[in-house]
Each structure stands twice: as structure tokens, then as C-alpha cells.
Amino acid sequence: MTPAAHTQYLRASGLRIGYCHSTQQTCVAEALELALLGGEFTCLLGPNGAGKSTLIRTLAGIQAPLAGTLQLQGQHFHTLPPRARARKISVVLTEALPIGMINAYSLVALGRHPYSGRLGGLNASDRARIEWAFQVVDATDLKDRAIAELSDGERQKIAIARALAQDAQIMLLDEPTAFLDLPRRVELMTLLRSLAHQERMALLLSTHDLELALRFADRLWLMMPDGQFVQGAPETLALNGRFAQAFASQDLDWDPTSGSFRVPPMPCLLVYINGHGIEYIWTQRALERLGFGLTDDPNAAVLSIVISQTTWHVKHLGIDQQFESIEGLIEWIQRINWSKQ
């Protein structure tokens, strides 16, 4: 459960982000008012080119804002020296990790650089933090492995462990799930949400994984195609239509009942389905995928399906059929020339 009280760790006012080319500026988004709160996991969403990575890099101090102010725990961001910033903000970017001959332990140990002396030696406190970081991401067995030998998922764990070793209260992550399979994406989102809640960290993650963001984020930031910036609880943005406005198109519809996007139905034949439970849901999905529309009127349907437990009873042109699996039903439907119906 998310803690009730939050502290502002990073605040932006009147923020204008973009790029400078000699004497010209390219603005990506402007008039941004936002804050990252301790104990809160925030997901940043938006279509390609909306400026997600630019915002992450600006908040991290990697590139300067075109206008506006940033405050880091009440201090003006750009008056802080780099080492002081690094003690407050850690960053996981999309750039590939250095490989060469470096092993995972050495890479994670780089997270202690803001605290080490001129010679870069590690003391007992540094080593304890590094060990903790490996344990949190469940990567203790990777410590002696060369980065070049690790899978994408393992490298992502090490990148996050390095950021955790940095002992900063703010973590910014740019597309960390981009090259992970679904189980690893879920695992990573679960980890990040737990870190935000249990360690009182402020975590901001940019992602294209809309459905996972809806399930895991405490707050969503939406960068709209028209340059607007919208924020709120996932449920609020799903209910008020802003989520659909950001991503829906002629090829994609937002379904608020399932909390997911779907391909809009094309003009097609109608099917009537009577049933309930998971069998009903997946039968509906299968028929929509095959190009049928759904109707509540059996008389308007070219095909009627009644689902009883794991049996599908089908009526078509006065002929009754029965199938013991949804795959059998699908294969039968695919054999019929529906253009002549």
C-alpha cells in the first residue's frame, strides 16, 4: 500500500524542454508543472516523439531546460555541484552498459563514486551498500560475471543495482523494460514499485508498456500528442478519457472496461455468444480476432454460440454443432466461406 504522506523531492515550475542548435531552440514541451514525491512510483507515457526521454534527461540534469526552474529537495537544481546532485538523483538510461572486461560487481561499485575519495577506494559502508543493491535486485549470483556474458534482463538488473548503490532518493529510468520479455517486465515493475513504497524513494519510469503502467504506477504522467502534459492516478486518467485521447487512433480503440487497447471492429458479420466466465471472455476475443462483431440479438446473428462449462454449442443455418475445445470451434469457423453468408 502506498504511504499516505509524501514529500516533494524534485519540483519543476514553468519547465520548457527541448534542444538548442547554435542560436535556435527546438521546444518539445513547455509550461510543465510537476513534482516527484517520495514513496511514489510514477510512470511517464506518451507517443513516440512526445519528449519522454528529453524530460527524463532534463530532470536528471544531463541537458539544461530551455526555461523554468528545477528544485531538488528545496534547493535550486543548477546551483548544486555535480557530486551533490549525484547523491540525490540516480539515472538508468537506454544507452548500453559498458562491456569490455568489466564484471557486474565493478560496475555496481561505480554507483559509490559520489561518496568515494580521490583514490576511489571503497570502505565498509560502501561495500555494504553494494551488497544490499545486489540483494534487492536478486542478482547476487551475478557479481563475478562479466557484463558481456549477461542477458538483457540481467544487465538491466545490474544497471538498477548500480543506481541503488548510489543511495539517491530519486531514481529516473528511461525505457528500462524495452528489451525484456513479459515475465521480466512484470518482475521489474514489481521491484520498482516496492522500492518506491518501502524505501520512500521517488521513482520515475518512462515506458511504452501502457497496460503494465496502468497496473503498477501510483501516478501517470502523460505527454500528449498536442504538447499538453496531463497527470493523475491511473484510474482517473482511464475514466476521464485522457488516456484514450493520448493513444487511441483509427487503428486502436481504448476499452475502459478491460483497461486495454484493442483493434476497432470492422464492418462484419454478427455473432451471438451466451455464456460466462473465462471461457466466454476468450471466445469473445477469438471471434473478434476472426472478424466478427458481437450482438445481443440471436436473430440478428449468423452464428449463435452457447458456452456450457468447456463445451461450445453452435447454431448456424439451422445446423447444430458441438465442440469440446475453443480451438476446435476456431478451426471450424475458419473452414467456412463467410463471404457467401
Image (tube, helix red, strand yellow):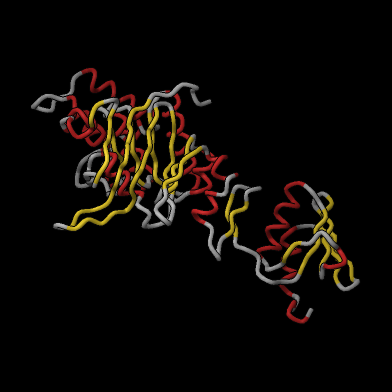
Give percent across and percent down for residue 13.
32, 37
Could you tell me which residue is drawn at 25 percent across and 44 percent down? 67
The answer to which image quadrant residue 78 occupies is top left
Q: Is 178 in front, or is 219?
A: 219
Give percent across and percent down for residue 65.
24, 44
Left or right: where 129 falls relative to 82: right
Left or right: where 289 falls relative to 99: right
Could you tell me which residue is drawn at 47 percent across and 37 percent down? 219
Give percent across and percent down for residue 289.
65, 64
Furthest residue to the top?
124
Vertical placement of residue 192 versus 31, above or below: above
Furthest residue to the left?
118
Could you tell me which residue is drawn at 62 percent across and 49 percent down? 256
Give percent across and percent down for residue 268.
71, 71
Q: Is 296 in front, or is 334?
A: 296
Q: Is 41 in front, or is 324?
A: 41
The answer to which image quadrant residue 335 occupies is bottom right
Query: Which quadrant: the C terminus?
Result: bottom right
Furthest residue to the bottom?
340
The number of discs equals: 0
